[in-house]
Amino acid sequence: MSRSRVYQWCTWFGEGRTSLGDEPKSGRPKTSTNEENTTRVDELIRCDRRMKIREIALKLEIPKSTVHEIVHDTLGYRKVSARWVPKMLTEDHKLQRVEISQHLLQRCQQDNGDGPNVPTSSWFGLGNANGD
C-alpha cells in the first residue's frame, strides 16, 4: 500500500467521509439493460436458439454490448453447438440425467461383461463384380 493512498484516505475521512467504498457515480444511468429488454431478448432466444447477438441487437435496436450483457450476465445463457442454452440445470433436468445414466449403466451390466452390442469393426470380403 502506498503512502499517498494512506494520505488520500486521511483527507477523505477528515472531510467527513465514513467509508472507503465507492460513492455513487454521477452520469448517465443504464437505460438499455432493463426488464423490458431482458424479456424481449429472452423471447427472441427461446424462439430461435441459433440467433446471434448481432441479429438480436439489430432487431431490438440496442447495442451489441448490452445484448451480450443481458444474454450472459442477466439470463445466464452460454453458447453450445450454435445454440443458446441456460447454464443452470433445473431439478427436473438433473433428475432426468440421473435416470438416463442409471438406465445406461443397467444395460451395460446386463451385457455379461462382453461390452455393448455395438459393432466396432466389420470385415467384408472383396470379390469381383462377376462373383469370383
Image: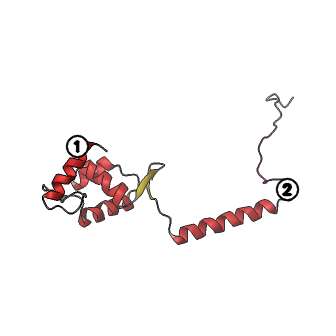
C-beta proximity under 8 Å, tags 1 and 2: no
Q: Mark 1 highlights which residue?
A: 4
Front residue of 90 and 59: 90
Residue range corresponding to the magenta coloring: 111-123
- Let me know if residue 64 is in the magenta part: no
At 32% from the left and 51% from the top, the residue drawn is 68
Query: Disc 1 to disc 2, how far (Cα)?
Result: 72 Å
* Residue 2 picture location, percent across and down: 28, 42
Q: How is the image coloured?
A: secondary structure
Q: Mark 2 highlights which residue?
A: 113
At 78% from the left and 41% from the top, the residue drawn is 121
Front residue of 104 and 88: 88
At 76% from the left and 50% from the top, the residue drawn is 118
At 34% from the left and 60% from the top, the residue drawn is 74
Examine the image and state in which quarter residue 39 appears: bottom left
Mark 1 / mark 2, whichever is N-terminal: 1
* Residue 21 picture location, percent across and down: 25, 58
Q: Element at badge 2?
A: loop
- Decide if residue 95 is on the left or right side of residue 124: left
